[in-house]
Every structure is written in structure tokens, then in C-alpha cells.
Amino acid sequence: MDVSRRGFLKISGAVLAASGVGISLKPVSAHAQPLKVKYTKETTTICPYCSVGCSIIVSTRGGKVINTEGDPDSPINKGSLCSKGGSIYQMAVNENRLSKPLYREPFGTAWKEVEWDWAFEKIAENVKKSRDASFKFKNAKGEVVNRTEGIASVGSAAMDLEECHTYQKFLRGLGLTYIEHQ
């Protein structure tokens, strides 16, 4: 790059002027202005998505969730939330959230709403049928294994530690070995 004496002085002057503006090259932490929703009741709760136990402030008005945010007074998360915790507002107000079970018949293309009792009975019936058909008492070596290989579990991202523990115990009690969880 060819820079004349005059060009060098212009660049030097610009750098000198910019340094006086207060631009710092030190790393800065992100800081957002606090959002305060007026005329709401604020309640603190714990995020249900994992076992970290991040604190969340839920603002409600008339029994409806208006806002959720991390609790800055919490020693655990200090006001920050992960992507799951940050989207917890959607758990309460998302219009696409299912509130009734849907059922699609085998080889069908349409979903239909069904009653909870019917859905639980259908799930229990299918689990029992599959477990009975695929249960192994012994492996090829003759060792007792007591497992079912016809059912797998994919888990849930919305369970806390205690729920996951209970869920694992339930699945192990059924004899599942293919258990994946987030």
C-alpha cells in the first residue's frame, strides 16, 4: 500500500481522534436494560428444563403470563438463561401448544383429537403388547437379562432431575435398554 506523507498524517490524526472518543478494546460483558412490566405480579420459580435450577421471574396479570426473565438475584444463573429457559414463556402462551392428545390410526394421514382416558388406555395396551412380544428372559449365552428390545425411549427436554430419575426407574422396570435422553 502506497501512503504519502499527507495520507499518513490524515490516518494518524483519525486514529488519534478516535482514541479520544472513549473506544475501549477491552472485552465487555453484555448488559441489557431491565424490562419491567407494570401492574403485574412477579413470582420467582425454578426452570423445569434441567437440573441446574436456574431462577426465573414470571410476571402475571389476571392469571396470565405476561413475561418471563432470569432472576438477577439468583446465585445460580445471575439473571441469565439458556435457550430453553429463555423460551419458557412459550410453554404457557404458545397457541400451537397441544392441550389434548392427538391420534393417527396406523397407515392413516389425518390426526384426530381423543380423550385423555382413551389415549392412556391405548398407550398402555400398545406397551403391553410390544413388551410381551419382545421380552427376553435370557440372552444367547443363557444369562438372565430380563429385557425388552421392542421398545425404545427418546426422552424429553422438559423434565427436571427428579422426573428423569423416576422416568428412568419406570423404563428400567419395563425392561427397556434403549433409552436416550437430552
Image (cartoon, helix red, strand yellow):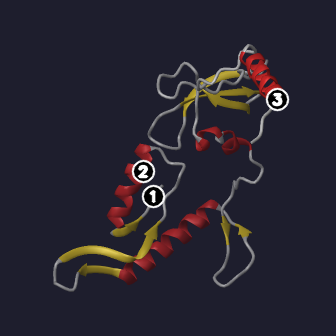
Camera-nearest label, 3 or 1 = 3
Residue 44: mark: none
Q: Could you tell me how far apart the alpha carbons at marks 3 and 1 are, in whole angstroms?
A: 62 Å
Q: Residue at x 75, y 54 (%)?
A: 96
Which numbered dot is residue 7? 3
**Callout 1–callout 2 Cβ contact below 8 Å:** yes
Regarding mark 3 in the picture, which secondary structure is present there? helix
Task: Give 140 or 10, whichever is nearer the viewer.
Answer: 10
Q: Residue furthest left?
A: 142
Of marks 2 and 3, the one in the foreground = 3
168 to 160, vertically: above or below: below
Amino acid on which the number 1 mark rests in the picture: His
Callout 2 amino acid: Cys
Q: Earlier in the sequence, mark 2 or mark 3?
A: 3
Residue that numbered label 2 is attached to: 164
Against 120, is 105 above or below? below
Q: Amino acid at mark 3?
A: Gly
Give the answer, above or below, for where 133 lies relative to 95: below
